[in-house]
Amino acid sequence: MEATLNLRLAFKDVDGLGARGMVEINGGFPGPVLRGKLGQTFVVHVVNHIHSYGISMHWHGVSMEEADGIWSDGTAHITQAAIPPRGVHTYKFTPDHAGTFWYHSHNNGLIDGAYGALIVESEDDPVTTGGDIVLVLSEWSTHNGPDLDAALVSGELTNGVLSALERSRSVLVNGKTHLDIPVEAGKTYLLRLINAGFLSNFGIVGSGDHEFSLVMADAHYVEPVNEIENIHFDAFGSGQRLTFLFTADQASGTFQYHVQSNIAFLAGVGALGGATTVPNSASFSFVYANGAPDNSFAEPSFIPTYVTASAPEFLVSEHDLRADKTKRQFVPVPKKPNVMLTMQTGVNLATGVFIMAGGEPFDLAPGLPFIAGNRDGAVWFDIDEGDVVDVVILNTLLAHPYHSHMFSGWVLAQGPGAFPGYAEVFPTFNLDNPVRRDTFQVSVDHPADPTGVGWAVYRLVANRRGPVAFHCHILSHHMTGMMAVLNVGSPPDVPAPASLFPFCGGYSPDHVDEPFFESSSDARSSSSSSSSSSSDSSSSSDSSSSKLKVGVVRVQTKPIAA
């Protein structure tokens, strides 16, 4: 499977609250759905037409079969330098399991719209008669990536300034505040939901006229959870994916579902930057053949709260999910670890800076990937290839969704409140069929209270050599310090990157001293056009792909310091 993603600036009003600078991919927002089959190799050319900052592309949830797959992970400053303006980089990877994935910029382009869905199909997928429906749920901020970058560089992080800048103003479904989805009575569909938000957990409340069966969490099959009508906030954090099977079993009509942000319930918490405007809800509707398009938007009569829902129609949390052992991609959990890492997370309430402690510090100098050896200032852990690692997260202040790059681990135990101790929780581990996830949530006992605490035990196998990112998936949190690197193996053992690898060698692409838009016409001219919707095509290029060789700079490979 081969595709080209052309990233360009645009200036559009996507939510009816005013135009702002944004990133389009192949002329649309979100980017096109990239689709392939298990066993296929993905070759994706990412072209950065953005003049004001460098970009990288991360393939969220993808574990790669290639020994050198770490170099396609797309984590700026850790596995590569960002692709500079007018630069192009080719990512090549073969996913080792099927499921619902997504791709996104791993620097400030995420808040500007640089993301899309990635689907890997397999023979294990449930049989449908209507195909799949891919919904990318996201949020929209008044501020753009360079605003966040400037706040980070200037050090203006006191009292949660960065979080306040990041705060979303709207919720979007496939780049729109409302989306009509045609369905045909009697057909079954696979509904793939992706939380591409940079901040929010999403809850979904519907009319109760359809029942959904959860069949996949992130990109791993689970024992079906049936009779679901709504999704609770706690079940759907940033970066996570949920895949449902459902039947369009109504004879006719239009049925609306509301997507809501949990920030409505956290507004006013000091660590989040104080009181803020609550993001608007978005909605989508299933429209039957004789149903009317649903152009109206009505607030639902019920909003999911943080009070645990006891009704069976709610998917409340991920705690009780179990892996489906009947699927061919089921992988048994190793019974015993040989390494335990403890990560204490929290926030400095005086500065609003999020922290992760427990390992050795490192410092990511501008434009210099981690593997080059700069390690003074954040958190890293040296582990050996093949280690079975239990990561114990001790979480203070707010729930956080943690994402493990390259490794899909097993969530063995988790809970709110103080950690009872490893010896105490070890007997409770589910070692038969624990759920595997690449993004998991650590809840707290009082979600809207700064004193809340929680914990989780996450087991992974370090089967990829090189630097692997592990971080909270809330953008401002990992930007300000809730990020660790699992350094697997030592530099002499790490596979060399492919040719034309973007190693910076002094170029710092993430902070260019230029405005987000040039005074020339390209970006501004798009303000008069309406926002483009997401495409379900996996087309390899847009109309400008023939110009790739004109004025494009390929970043040359340089030796990596041992």
Image: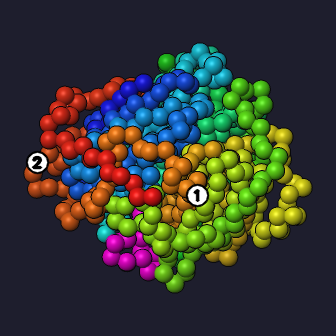
User: Was residue 455 drawn as part of the magenta stretch in this picture?
Assistant: no
Residue for point 73% across, 26% down: 327
Where residue 116 sits, quadrant-wise, is top left
Identify the amino acid type marked 1.
Leu
> Which is more N-terminal, label 1 or label 2?
1
* 276 shown above or below 495: below
Residue 343, position as x, y percentages in the image: 65, 67
| Label 1 residue SS | strand
Query: Residue 262: x percent and y percent?
Result: 57, 58
Identify the residue shown where x is 18% and y is 62%. 514
| Residue segment shown in magenta | 151-166
Which residue lies under the disc numbered 1?
486
- The residue drawn where x is 51% and y is 52% is 492
* Of the pair 41 and 301, the residue shown nearer to us: 41
Element under disc 2 = helix
User: How many numbered callouts?
Assistant: 2
The CA distance from mark 2 to mark 1 is: 44 Å
Q: Is residue 452 left or right of residue 33?
A: right
Q: Is residue 175 above or below residue 180?
A: below
Front label number (2 vs 1): 1
Badge 2 local density, few (<14 within 10 Å), some, or many (20+)? few
Residue 154 sits inside the magenta stretch? yes
Using residue 557 as the reference point, say whether residue 373 is left or right of it: right
| Extreme residue in the left direction | 520
Q: Which residue is mark 2?
A: 521
Quadrant holding the C terminus = bottom left
Image position, residue 214 (x, y; %): 69, 35
| Residue 363 lies in quadrant | bottom left
